[in-house]
């Protein structure tokens, strides 16, 4: 029996664990650093409420990094605490991805994987969609006044309504316009990856999930990974496996590789970590910078998912949040979905308790600043309000992250000096080790990454089982 150890029960880890453990000839063990409530029924109710993002200062289920970057730290990972917005990137992103990593990542290759995953209540019957898959998708029908007004203003400004934002996009027609947000919500409850994938597989005798278990380092014999070291409270241990797959997310998968001696040589030397294999881990990463445009509004709050509508205008996405970030104010987020600037992830210490450092370098490119200014001007036009002056200090003061970090362990062929993993997530130069999460996406995605993360995990799992 092959034993596979999965590090992290997040968006990708849940999908991978469910798919791999469907094979009774494989034993699958999952280590999750946060709580892994053993049954769906034991999940705290607030985690099932899609209108609640449990990321505030009081939250005990997130990793925190500088720049307000957070990640989910519980069964389901970031997919258990996110905005439930489930959207596929356009075909152009997969053209760029497959140019780097081969035809397995072309739009034509990944579309069937997206279709098999979904059970789309509104468009499942349409070409390029699916019904009966594990992930329920629906769109809000009963909007808050704020969302409805936003949609009206978009229409009045001449934007087209796009009924299905997940339509297989090959033409420019579908790129610009406003539309209802596709949500991983069913009967008013959040349906994250633990709910759609891991819990339904939990009864299998060949699958085990250990919560509150943080993997601190990979165990290597030469360049072969033979298992991991972990900590659980005061307990420390080692677990061995034939194959280890990192699904710890874009920050922690990269951090774990670096702590284990797989990373940029100067960084490993500065940390005092023995070098196992030089690799450009963390040398590139990307996210969607977002500036918040706030304005006074004291209309009563209505319970709702964070986003019901969005407007896409070329590389900008306008997000009319139903929730408040500042009392007495509404916010429209202006996100740049294809930034030029790239960031870097490093460690300042080899101690697993010290958080990794992500330097997003958001406003470094003049074009990125100009596009964000364009987005603020568009928001001002839609709202019929004056905003600004929108100079660089204004952008800096109102800047945030969309929480969409990706690309710290890029995919690409061995001769690509920026690549950490191959087209199936296997780490170059290391045996029995793969990475299967958002960290391996080699290009900026023009849409939120949740749908891509689960598609990616499903595609990698399918390759591992054949
Ligand atoms: C607040 C928030 C809102 C978001 N909203 C949206 C949205 O609406 N739409 C969208 O498309 N995207 C959204 N995203 C992004 C999206 O959720 C993530 O990009 C996606 O879930 C990443 O999946 P992943 O599997 O790569 O990592 P994660 O889902 O973060 O999973 C990583 C898992 O590994 C565990 N782990 C980490 N290190 C270790 C270790 N050393 N040992 C053991 N376990 C470990 C973590 O605890 C976690 O459970 C949001 C993200 C956040 C944080």
Image (cartoon, helix red, strand yellow):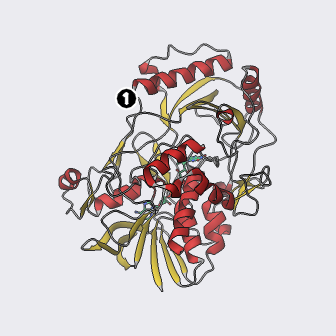
In which quarter of the view is residue 117 placed? bottom right
Q: Decide if residue 161 is on the left or right side of residue 102.
A: right
The location of residue 91, given as percent across then percent down, is: 59, 44
Residue 210 can be seen, yes or no: no
The location of residue 273, given as percent across then percent down, is: 21, 60
Query: Which is nearer the eye, 20 or 103?
Result: 103
Q: Decide if residue 268 is on the left or right side of residue 226.
A: left
Relative height, residue 156 to residue 139 (above, below): above
Residue 97 can be seen, yes or no: yes
The residue at the point 50 percent across, 24 percent down is 371
Q: Decide if residue 190 is on the left or right side of residue 7.
A: right
- Helix, strand or loop status at disc 1: loop
Total number of numbered labels?
A: 1
The location of residue 306, given as percent across then percent down, is: 66, 41
In which quarter of the view is residue 162 placed? top right
Relative height, residue 33 to residue 26 (above, below): above
Q: Give the residue pinned by disc 1.
A: 364
């Amino acid at each position: 029996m092959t034993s596979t150890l999965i590090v992290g029960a997040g968006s990708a880890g849940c999908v991978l664990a469910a798919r791999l453990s469907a094979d009774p000839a494989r034993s699958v063990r999952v280590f999750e650093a946060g709580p892994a409530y053993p049954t769906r029924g034991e999940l705290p109710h607030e985690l099932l409420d899609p209108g609640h993002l449990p990321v505030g200062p009081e939250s005990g289920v997130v990793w925190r990094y500088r720049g307000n970057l957070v990640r989910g730290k519980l069964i389901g990972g970031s997919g258990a605490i996110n905005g439930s917005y489930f959207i596929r990137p356009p075909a152009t992103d997969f053209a760029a991805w497959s140019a780097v990593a081969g035809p397995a990542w072309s739009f034509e290759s990944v579309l069937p994987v997206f279709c098999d995953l979904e059970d789309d209540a509104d468009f499942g019957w349409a070409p390029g969609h699916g019904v009966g898959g594990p992930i329920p998708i629906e769109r809000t029908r009963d909007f808050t006044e704020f969302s409805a007004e936003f949609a009206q203003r978009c229409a009045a400004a001449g934007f087209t309504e796009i009924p299905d934002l997940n339509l297989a996009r090959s033409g420019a027609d579908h790129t610009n316009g406003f539309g209802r947000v596709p949500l991983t919500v069913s009967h008013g409850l959040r349906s994250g990856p633990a709910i759609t994938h891991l819990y339904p597989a939990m009864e299998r005798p060949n699958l085990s999930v250990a919560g509150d278990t943080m993997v601190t380092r990979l165990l290597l014999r030469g360049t072969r990974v033979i298992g991991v070291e972990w900590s659980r409270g005061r307990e420390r241990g080692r677990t061995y496996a034939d194959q280890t797959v990192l699904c710890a997310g874009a920050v922690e998968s990269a951090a774990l590789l670096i702590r284990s001696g797989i990373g940029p040589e100067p960084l490993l030397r500065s940390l005092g970590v023995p070098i196992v294999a030089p690799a450009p881990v963390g040398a590139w990463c990307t996210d969607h910078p977002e500036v918040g445009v706030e304005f006074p509004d004291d209309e009563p709050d209505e319970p709702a998912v964070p986003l019901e509508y969005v407007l896409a205008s070329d590389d900008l996405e306008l997000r009319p949040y139903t929730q408040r970030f500042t009392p007495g104010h509404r916010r429209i987020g202006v996100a740049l979905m294809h930034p030029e600037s790239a960031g870097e992830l490093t460690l300042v210490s080899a101690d697993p308790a010290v958080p990794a450092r992500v330097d997003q370098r958001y406003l470094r490119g003049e074009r990125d600043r100009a596009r964000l200014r364009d987005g603020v001007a568009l928001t001002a036009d839609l709202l019929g309000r004056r905003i600004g002056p929108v100079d660089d200090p204004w952008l800096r003061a109102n800047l945030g992250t969309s929480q969409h970090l990706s690309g710290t362990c890029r995919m690409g062929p061995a001769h690509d000096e920026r690549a950490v993993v191959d087209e199936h997530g296997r780490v170059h130069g290391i045996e029995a080790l793969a990475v299967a999460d958002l960290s391996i996406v080699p290009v900026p995605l023009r849409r939120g990454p949740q749908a891509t993360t689960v598609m990616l995990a499903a595609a990698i799992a399918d390759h591992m089982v054949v």
